[in-house]
Image: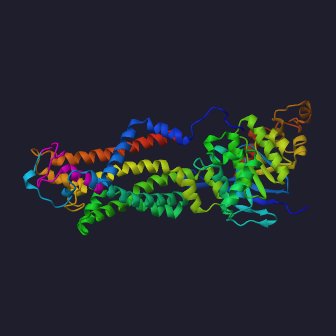
């Protein structure tokens, strides 16, 4: 197997939170705690977890928008510098916010091309090519974001992310801001592009049914730790961690096959683990950790 | 994913023009500003007595009340006040234009830099801004005129030296809001340069409020300039200036009322025009930015 496109080794991020009288006491909130994972070329890695589990913080660290507290990020086997351009692109959650309202579609897509020193004539041709790739008509190049629907905006954002032919494309909840009918179309487009262009995806979502269909391998993130990892089929059929069992058991099922494949929660003796109990347990561990 | 079909929709530009052209305030303001600028440029061609601009004396016609011959009457040496008011527009408009051409770009750039980079850059720029904001422009202009010589140039420099602070504040607060938005982060991850992010991503989203503020400012600067020349610290005679004319006419009040009232009214209408235009633009941007 060739070197993985992305490798995270012991990646951690702690935020300091002030509390107590006059904010004198500080407590560390470990948003991401010792996360290690590898993503091979052409693979779709799904990172699932509820809000606050550290999914977006991991994405921001890979992008270089947030400094990790500890750990290394390796791209193509080489550690990335703290600053500087990375061969990674990201499709943001809300296409309404990730496109500048005062810039046309062509102007937005041209930004990464200009950075790479592509001339005006070549860049116009490339914009047309990229629009075709994301199945938008060419004349959309002159439109402003407010003239487009949510799905169309997200397609533009995808085109912009693809402009630099990134080694890894991070999809941070790319469809959660879209209508369900549009979601499916955007996911289909991403799957097609991934196949045709041999893209490597880090797909971040809280939507497990979407992840089951889209990801090759899945990591389940809980309170900043990866509690479960494996191929999508393995994880969904036989989750080993109590939290992933809870999460997966709560996914609505569409067919009898899926219903049979669904794990039942009381697989261990004793009380059914609840999210509250787990949170309390983890919080206790964290507070002990920070005192030590 | 397809086109809108046979229903034609107005472009954003057309919608904005529709709203602007149906806003009486904005239209009156625009009309006043355009008329004033045209009158100032074409002053030698449209005024009945262009020679009255200089040190002309016409004692036979002194203190003539407004008439068909002298629309705004004549002053204490018999010069046509209407002609002098039209030429006086040149001074007022030049003052406003020069002050804003200096202050707006300087203030905008400093505000962008302080708002985007934060940290020490922000502290230094914004503290200087706070100090400068504490000095009233009129007092600054008086001080500069007292130290240097009273002239239009010195008045312009004194006002510009303080006026940028308002724009720095405005753009700073806008930049603080905009830099947290995803499209700025997206541009950062795409590797765009700081220059690109400041002037291509953030600045276009600040333009609405900047344009509105600049238009309102033009009115204030004209009033300030008039106040300075009323105090004798602006442009020096015999060049006609609206503020100076009000001051000169004041000694002949109330019987020769037109000598102060006419140039005073011109100042009022000019300042009002810029304010109405600014208000109209604000209404326009308030809607289109929702």
Colour scheme shown: rainbow
Please state which of residues B115 and B36 is positioned toward the viewer in this rendering.
Answer: B36
Q: Is residue B155 left or right of residue A60?
A: left
Q: Position of residue B256 (x, y in %)?
A: 11, 46
Look at 24% across and 51% down and name the residue there.
B47
B284 left or right of B32? right
Whether residue A260 appears in magenta in the rendering, the answer is no
Quadrant of the frame with the N terminus of chain A:
bottom right
**A267 versus B102 height, above or below:** above
Report the span colored magenta: B65-91
Evaluate whether residue A66 shows in this view: no
Q: Looking at the figure, which quarter contains the C terminus of chain A? A: bottom right
Of A23 and B252, which appears nearest the observer?
Answer: B252
Q: Is residue A233 visible?
A: yes
**Residue A270 location in percent, x, y?**
86, 37
Number of residue marks:
0
Horizontal and vertical percent for residue A194? 82, 50
Reply yes or no: does residue B87 show up in magenta.
yes
Instruction: Report the front residue among A220 and B99.
Output: B99
Residue appearing at x 85%, y 57% in the figure: A41
**Percent position of residue A262, x then y:** 88, 35
| Residue farthest along the left direction in this orientation | B60
Q: Quadrant of residue A35?
A: bottom right
Closest to the observer: B198 or B267? B267
- Compared with B55, B250 (above or below) is above
């Amino acid at each position: 197997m060739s070197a993985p496109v992305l490798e995270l080794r012991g990646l951690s991020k702690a935020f300091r939170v002030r509390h107590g009288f006059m904010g004198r006491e500080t407590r560390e909130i470990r948003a991401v705690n010792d996360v290690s994972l590898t993503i091979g070329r052409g693979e779709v890695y799904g990172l699932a977890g509820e809000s606050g589990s550290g999914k977006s913080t991991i994405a921001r660290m890979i992008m270089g928008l947030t400094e990790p507290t500890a750990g290394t990020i390796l791209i193509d086997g080489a550690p990335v510098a703290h600053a500087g351009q990375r061969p990674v692109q990201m499709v943001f959650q809300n296409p309404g916010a990730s496109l500048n309202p005062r810039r046309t579609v062509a102007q937005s897509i041209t930004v990464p091309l200009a950075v790479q020193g592509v001339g005006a004539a070549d860049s116009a041709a490339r914009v047309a090519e990229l629009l075709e790739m994301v199945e938008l008509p060419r004349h959309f190049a002159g439109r402003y974001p407010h003239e487009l629907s949510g799905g169309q905006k997200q397609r533009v954002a995808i085109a912009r992310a693809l402009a630099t032919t990134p080694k890894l494309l991070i999809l941070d909840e790319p469809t959660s801001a879209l209508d369900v009918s549009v979601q499916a179309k955007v996911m289909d487009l991403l799957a097609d592009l991934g196949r045709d262009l041999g893209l490597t995806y880090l797909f971040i979502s809280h939507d497990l049914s979407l992840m089951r269909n889209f990801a090759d391998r899945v990591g389940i993130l809980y309170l900043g730790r990866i509690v479960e990892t494996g191929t999508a089929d393995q994880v969904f059929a036989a989750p080993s961690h109590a939290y992933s069992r809870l999460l997966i058991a709560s996914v609505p099922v569409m067919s009898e096959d899926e219903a049979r494949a669904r794990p039942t929660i009381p697989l261990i003796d004793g009380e059914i683990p609840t999210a509250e109990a787990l949170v309390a347990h983890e919080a206790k561990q964290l507070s002990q950790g920070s005192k030590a | 994913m397809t086109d809108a079909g046979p229903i034609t929709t107005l472009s954003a530009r057309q919608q904005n023009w529709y709203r602007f052209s149906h806003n009486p305030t904005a239209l009156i303001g625009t009309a006043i500003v355009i008329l004033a600028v045209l009158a100032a440029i074409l002053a030698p061609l449209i005024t009945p007595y262009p020679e009255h601009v200089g040190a002309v004396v016409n004692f036979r016609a002194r203190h003539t009340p407004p008439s068909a011959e002298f629309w705004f009457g004549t002053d204490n040496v018999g010069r046509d006040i209407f002609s002098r008011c039209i030429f006086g527009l040149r001074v007022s408009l030049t003052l406003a234009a020069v002050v804003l051409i200096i202050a707006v770009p300087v203030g905008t750039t400093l505000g962008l830099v302080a708002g985007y980079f934060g940290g020490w850059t922000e502290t230094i720029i914004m503290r200087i801004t706070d100090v400068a904001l504490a000095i009233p422009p009129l007092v600054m202009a008086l001080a500069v005129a007292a130290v240097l010589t009273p002239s239009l140039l010195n008045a312009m420099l004194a006002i510009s030296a303080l006026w940028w602070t308002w724009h720095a504040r405005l753009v700073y607060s806008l930049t603080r809001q905009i830099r947290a938005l995803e499209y700025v982060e997206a541009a950062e991850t795409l590797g765009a340069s700081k220059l690109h992010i400041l002037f291509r991503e953030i600045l276009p989203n600040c333009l609405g409020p900047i344009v509105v503020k600049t238009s309102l400012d033009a009115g204030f600067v004209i009033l300030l300039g008039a106040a300075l020349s009323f105090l004798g610290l602006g442009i020096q005679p015999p060049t006609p200036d609206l503020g100076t004319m009000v001051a000169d006419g004041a000694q002949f009040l109330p019987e020769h009322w037109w000598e102060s009232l006419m140039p005073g009214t011109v100042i009022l209408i000019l300042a009002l025009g810029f304010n109405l235009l600014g208000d109209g633009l604000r209404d326009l941007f308030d809607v289109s930015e929702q």
